[in-house]
Amino acid sequence: MIIRVRVIPKAYENEVVGRIGSVIRVKVMSKEVTEKANNVLINYLAEFFEVNPGKIHIMRGENAKEKMVQIAGRPEDELEEVMETIP
């Protein structure tokens, strides 16, 4: 599954805060959108979608707030069910 993620840095905790259209908004506990923030994002998305962090790949936007992320490791329909829980 490929998703678009909008990263919101400088958060007190990592959390999915919602969706705007097809873009998932995720707060991360990192000061800036850097490689460290990307690692925090990957680990948090792995926990959120219940997959191995190695199954998450940032395809585009490594240095930007908006990213295109590929998630593997679970069947597509299960990942879509998790997506549906995001308000």
Image (cartoon, helix red, strand yellow):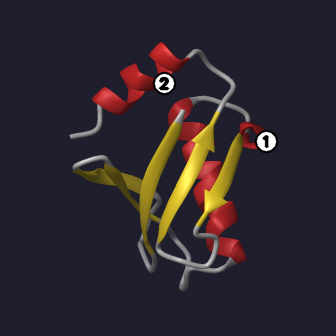
Q: Residues within 10 Å of mark 2 (few under 14, many from 20)?
A: some
Location of residue 50 by image quarter: top right
Amino acid at pointer 1: Gly
Kind of element beneath mark 2: helix
**Residue 40 as seen in the image, left or right of residue 23:** right
Residue for point 29% across, 30% down: 85
Depicted 5 relative to depicted 30: above or below: above
The C terminus sits in image quarter: top left
**Residue 19 as seen in the image, left or right of residue 35:** left
Q: Which mark is residue 54?
A: 1
Q: Residue 60: percent from the left, percent from the top? A: 61, 63
Q: Residues within 10 Å of mark 1 (few under 14, many from 20)?
A: few
The N terminus sits in image quarter: top right
Q: Residue 65: percent from the left, percent from the top? A: 47, 74
Amino acid at pointer 2: Leu
Q: Nearer the viewer, residue 13 or 18?
A: 18
Residue for point 64% across, 71% down: 62
Q: CA distance from mark 1 to mark 2?
A: 16 Å
**Residue that extends furthest to the bottom in the rendered view of this protein:** 32
Mark 2 lies on residue: 79
Residue for point 56% across, 77% down: 30
